[in-house]
Image (cartoon, rainbow, N blue to C red):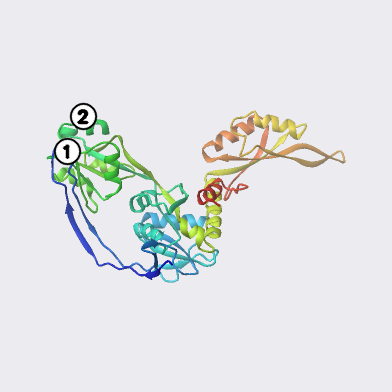
Amino acid sequence: MAVVQTIFLQCPSASISSFSASPSPTINRVSVKFMVSCCSVASPITVVNGNVDKRPSERDEVRLGLPSKGRMATDTLELLKDCQLSVRQVNPRQYVAEIPLLSNLEVWFQRPKDIVRKLVSGDLDLGIVGLDTVSEYGQGNEDLILVHDALEYGDCHLSLAIPKYGIFENINSFKELAQMPQWTPERPLRVATGFTYLAPKFMKDNGLKNVIFSTADGALEAAPAMGIADAIVDLVSSGTTLRENNLKEIEGGVILESQAVLVASRKSLIQRKGVLDITHEMLERLEAHLRAAGQFTVTANMRGSSAEEVAERILSQTSLSGLQGPTVSPVFGKRDGKVTADYYAIVICAPKKELYKSVQQLRAIGGSGVLISPLTYIFDEETPRWRQLLSNLGL
C-alpha cells in the first residue's frame, strides 16, 4: 500500500561563494561564483513512497504572472490593452490585479525570473516573460510549454562579446576564440555573465573547455577593461553599449535570440480547471491583434464589365492579392431610369510597407476613391498555435 504524505518545503538563505575543480592535464577547471537565495515554497508537494509528485496547488483561480517593472512590464500591459485585455490594478502598490474580461483570472506582478520559478513550482499557471528568462531559469524543464513564442516586443539576443583590442584584435569568430593557445587549464578564458546556466552550457556544447565563469549584476561591459574578465556573455539589443566599451560580437557567438513569449505550466493546462479555456482566449486575441498589426484595409471603386474582369485586373498586380484575394462587389446606380452596375467596389488588405505601392497599382488599373483604414484584428478559422499546443499536450 502506497504511503502518501503532503509536506511543505522551506530552506534558509544560503551563499555559495565559489567552487572549482583542481587543475590537471585531463580535468578542465570550472569556477563559478554566485549567490543563491532559497525561499519558502507555498505549494504542497505530495510524496508517494518517497517519490515527489509536484501537482498544481489547491486553488480555484487561474494565475497569470506579468513583469512588475521596466520596459518589458510597460510593453506587456500595452499589448494586453490592445487585445482588449486591459489589466485593472486597484492599488499600484499591490502585486495582484485582474483582467475584467477574463473571469477567475488573477494577475500577479513578479520579477521575470520569479515568474518562471513559480510556473515550475505550480504557484502560477501562465506568464509573459522574455525567452531568455524562460531558458535561463527554466533550464529545459519539460513542464514549461511555450504557448506563443513571438509576441513581437522585447527583442534582444544573448551573445558572447570580446574586446576589440589586444590579443582579441584579429579574433572574429567563436572558432578562432576557442583555438587560441592562451586558454589552458592553468589559465582558462575568464567570462563574466549573469547567465550561469546558458553561458556554461553554450561553451560546453561548442567545445570550449578551458573556461571559468564569474557573475556580476550590471555593468558587465566594464569587466574586460578592468582586467577581471576576458569576455562577457550578456543580452544585446542595439549593440551600442558594447561598441562604446570597445567590445565586439563575433561570428557564432550568439547563444539565443529572444523576445517576449507567453509560457504556461503543462500540468496546469492539463489538470487545473479553466486554464486551457483562458489560454485559448488569450492566444486567439494575441494572434488576431499581432497578425493585424501593420495591416490596412484598402477600398476603391473601379469601372468594369463584370466582377470577374475586375478581379482579373487586380490579381495581375503583385501588391493587390490581399490575404486570400480581393473582395469585388457591384456598385449599383441608375442610368436612363435603369439600375446598372458599371462600377465595382474592391476591398483588399495591404501591409504598411506595401501601402503606397498598392495605391499606385490600383490607380494604374483604373481604381479611384481609394480609402485606407487600419486593421485591429484578423481572426483565422483556427490559430495554428492553438492546434500545436493541443498536440504538444496530447489532447
Q: Position of residue 311 (x, y in %)?
A: 70, 33
Q: Is 213 on the left-hand or right-hand side of 68?
A: left
Q: Is 246 on the left-hand or right-hand side of 57?
A: left
Q: In the rendered structure, which amino acid carries the disc numbered 1?
A: Thr
| Label 1 sits on residue | 26
In the picture as drawn, the residue positioned furthest to the front comes out as 1
Number of disc labels: 2
**Residue visible at 18% across and 31% down?**
180
Q: Is residue 81 above or below residue 201?
A: below
Q: Position of residue 223 (x, y in %)?
A: 18, 46
User: Which sits in the foreground, 364 or 174?
Assistant: 174
User: Which sits in the foreground, 267 or 335?
Assistant: 267
| Label 2 sits on residue | 170
Q: Residues within 10 Å of mark 2 (few under 14, many from 20)?
A: few
Q: Is residue 307 visible?
A: yes
Q: Position of residue 17 (x, y in %)?
A: 17, 56
Q: Is residue 46 above or below residue 229?
A: below
Closer to us: mark 1 or mark 2?
1
Q: Is residue 173 visible?
A: no
Q: In the rendered structure, which amino acid carries the disc numbered 2?
A: Asn
To which quarter of the image does residue 1 belong?
Answer: bottom left
